[in-house]
Image (cartoon, rainbow, N blue to C red):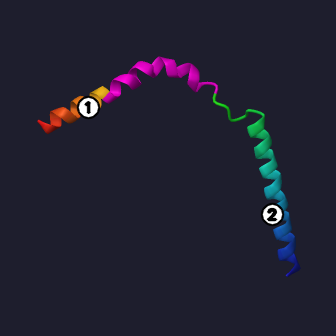
Amino acid sequence: MSVIYILITVSIVVAIVFLIAFIKAVKSGQFDDDYTPSVRILFDDEIKKSPSKIIKVEKQKSI
């Protein structure tokens, strides 16, 4: 039974360490997306055109 207490304690400590590491990574900007904003302008026209294409396709189907 004492082994269970040791395993639970160790698992909680490991979980806390991973949580602290994750929080440090988020605060330091590790997961910031620097690539997408620079590429978004290249595909801006395609995004604007796609809703009109969808509407045209729906109109053709209804006729």
Q: Is residue 5 one of those drawn in magenta?
A: no
Nearer to the camera, 11 or 47 = 47
> Quarter holding the C terminus?
top left
* In this rendering, position of residue 24 left or right of residue 38: right
- What residue appears at the point 68 percent right and 35 percent down from the top-left corner? 31
- What residue appears at the point 50 percent right and 18 percent down from the top-left corner? 41
Q: Disc 2 on helix, strand or loop? A: helix
Q: In the rendering, at what x and y percent does residue 5 appear? A: 85, 74
* In this rendering, position of residue 5 left or right of residue 44: right
Helix, strand or loop for the magenta stretch, by majority:
helix
Q: Is residue 40 above or below residue 21?
A: above
Q: Which one is closest to the eye, mark 2 or mark 1?
A: 1
Q: In the rendering, at what x and y percent does residue 46 appear? A: 39, 22
Amino acid type at image mark 1: Ile
* In this rendering, position of residue 61 left or right of residue 49: left
Q: Which residue is mark 2?
A: 11
State which quadrant residue 37 falls in. top right
Residue 55 is tagged as 1
Amino acid type at image mark 2: Ser
Q: Disc 1 on helix, strand or loop? A: helix
Which span of residues is magenta-colored? 34-51
Q: In the rendering, at what x and y percent does residue 36 appear? A: 57, 26
- What residue appears at the point 40 percent right and 25 percent down from the top-left corner? 47
Q: In the rendering, at what x and y percent does residue 58 appear? A: 22, 35
Compute the Cα span from label 2 to label 1. 54 Å
Q: Earlier in the sequence, mark 2 or mark 1?
A: 2
Nearer to the camera, 54 or 13 = 54
